[in-house]
Image (spheres, rainbow, N blue to C red):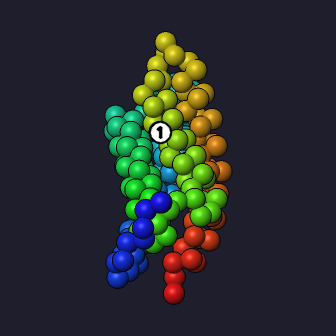
């Protein structure tokens, strides 16, 4: 067990977390739109804009970075405030979201005609990730209430 840090306030940290979570959810929504566009254009054998796939990858990479930032903030903030981890269901749900996000990103890099399973894994992971984001948002709201005066 690590002793709680005697810092004036972690409010600045939670503000960064709130913005990161909001931007992560926004990125997830944009990924859904661009991913659907990619899938429809592929299924209908229509040409797609040259910038669509790089945009989808860029937004995905940004979301991975935001989710990892949220993980770091959660660990630092909780250890700093309480001195230990595991005070709520938010930790396991958050770790699940991190794992799903990384699995989704990895599976995206595997999509090719030689690996037809990768597209299904990517899409399925993202559907489960939606449930994960809902759960982490709900448990996160409960955690935030502990830190507010």
Judged from this view, the residue extending furthest toward the top is: 114
Q: Residue at x 47, y 60 (%)?
A: 1
**Residue 73 sits in quarter:** bottom left
Q: Where is residue 116 in the image (x, y as percent from the top left)?
A: 56, 18
Q: Residue 94, relative to residue 120: is it above or below? A: below
Q: Residue furthest bottom?
A: 149
| Residue at 35% across, 82% down | 8
* The one of 106 and 114 positioned closer to us in this rendering: 106
Residue 138 visible in this rendered orientation of the protein: yes
What residue sits 37% from the left and 49% below the top? 65
Residue of label 1 = 102
Q: Which of the two residues, 36 or 129, is positioned nearer the viewer here?
A: 129
Q: Whole-percent x and y of residue 32?
A: 53, 46
Whether 123 is drawn above or below 86: the answer is above
Q: Left or right of 95: which side holds 128?
A: right
Of 75 and 117, the residue lying toward us: 75
Say what secondary structure mark 1 lies in.
Answer: helix
| Residue positioned 34% across, 34% down in the render | 50
Residue 100 x/y as whole percent:
55, 41
Up-down relation of residue 138 to residue 59 (above or below): below
Task: Tell me if residue 134 can be seen.
Answer: no
Side (left or right) of 4 relative to 138? left
How many other residues sit within 10 Å of disc 1, few (<14), some (14-19) or many (≥20)? some
Total marks placed: 1
Depth check, front residue: 5 or 23: 5
Relative image position of residue 112 (x, y in whole percent) = 46, 19
């Amino acid at each position: 067990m690590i002793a709680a840090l005697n810092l004036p306030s972690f409010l600045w940290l939670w503000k960064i977390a709130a913005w990161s979570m909001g931007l992560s959810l926004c990125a997830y929504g944009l990924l859904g739109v661009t991913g659907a566009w990619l899938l429809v254009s592929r299924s209908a054998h229509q040409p797609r804009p040259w910038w669509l796939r790089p945009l989808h990858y860029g937004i995905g990479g940004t979301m991975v970075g935001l989710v990892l930032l949220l993980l770091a903030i959660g660990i630092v903030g909780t250890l700093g405030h309480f001195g230990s981890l595991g005070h709520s269901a938010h930790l396991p749900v958050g770790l699940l979201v991190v794992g799903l996000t990384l699995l989704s990103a990895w599976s995206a890099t595997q999509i090719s005609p030689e690996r037809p399973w990768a597209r299904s894994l990517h899409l399925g992971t993202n559907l489960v990730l939606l449930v994960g984001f809902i759960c982490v948002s709900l448990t996160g709201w409960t955690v935030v209430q502990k830190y507010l005066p």
